[in-house]
Image (cartoon, helix red, strand yellow):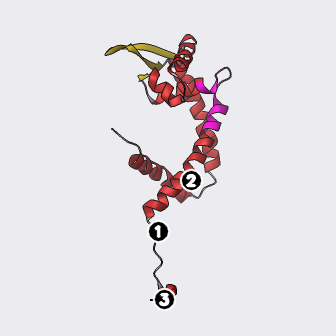
């Protein structure tokens, strides 16, 4: 068989999907982070706001897990938690199973701030997404849910 007649291999759909995820998700996350920072209230640093978002996503998460999420040391995360608790945005409790660990939760005011920033960000994204064809608007949420289900470990 000559080289001109060799069958062209079809790309593996999973590989094509993986390449698309790797190419597009970081760009999307940059847009989300930027929009959320713009929606955050004055007087909160970006790490403090990210700590509030973490507490919303991981109620009862540890200060150590927050440090890992923020990419900072435990003392740095502890200082951020203390500042947010002093402002009434986080509640801090000792872990009933290990008194050395501290658990964090959003306070009602912290939840109000996160919800308001989320709503402003979602409204801005909805405006931008409204330019897509209706069929894409209908299929994208299901595709994202399937993607998350396949990639996020549920251990």
Q: Is 141 on the left or on the right of 97, as rendered? A: right
Q: Position of residue 5 (x, y in %)?
A: 48, 87
Our reading of the magenta stretch's main secondary structure is helix
Q: Which residue is mark 3?
A: 2
Quadrant assignment, res 60: top left
Residue 30 position, x and y percent, is: 61, 42
Q: Earlier in the sequence, mark 3 or mark 2?
A: 3
In front here: 12 or 5?
Answer: 5
Q: Nearer the viewer, mark 1 or mark 3?
A: 3
SS for dot 1: loop
Tag 3–tag 2 contact (CB < 8 Å): no
Residue at horizontal 48 percent and vertical 56 percent from the top: 18
Q: Residues within 10 Å of mark 2 (few under 14, many from 20)?
A: few
Distance of label 1 from label 3 (alpha carbons): 22 Å
Is residue 94 placed above or below 62 in the rendered structure?
above
Near mark 1 (Cα within 10 A), the count class, few <14, some 14-19 or many ≥20, is few
- Going from N to C along the chain, the mark reached first, 1 or 2, is 1
Image marks 1 and 2: residues in contact by CB distance under 8 Å: no
Instruction: Give whichever of discs 1 and 3 has the lower sequence position.
Output: 3
Q: Nearer the viewer, residue 101 or 55?
A: 101
Q: Position of residue 80 (x, y in %)?
A: 56, 18
Q: Which residue is mark 1?
A: 11
> Badge 2 is on which residue?
23
Q: Which residues are magenta?
A: 33-47
The quarter of the displayed image where residue 41 is located:
top right
């Amino acid at each position: 068989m000559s080289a001109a007649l060799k069958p062209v291999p079809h790309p593996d759909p999973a590989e094509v999907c993986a390449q698309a995820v790797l190419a597009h998700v970081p760009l999307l996350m940059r847009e989300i982070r930027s929009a959320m920072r713009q929606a955050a209230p004055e007087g909160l640093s970006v790490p403090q706001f990210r700590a509030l978002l973490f507490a919303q996503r991981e109620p009862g998460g540890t200060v150590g897990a927050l440090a890992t999420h923020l990419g900072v040391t435990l003392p740095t995360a502890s200082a951020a938690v203390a500042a947010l608790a002093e402002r009434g945005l986080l509640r801090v409790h000792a872990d009933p199973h290990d008194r050395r660990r501290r658990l964090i939760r959003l306070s009602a005011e912290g939840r109000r701030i996160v919800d308001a920033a989320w709503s402003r960000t979602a409204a801005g994204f909805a405006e931008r997404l409204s330019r897509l064809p209706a069929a894409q608007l209908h299929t994208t949420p299901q595709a994202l849910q399937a993607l998350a289900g396949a990639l996020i470990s549920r251990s």
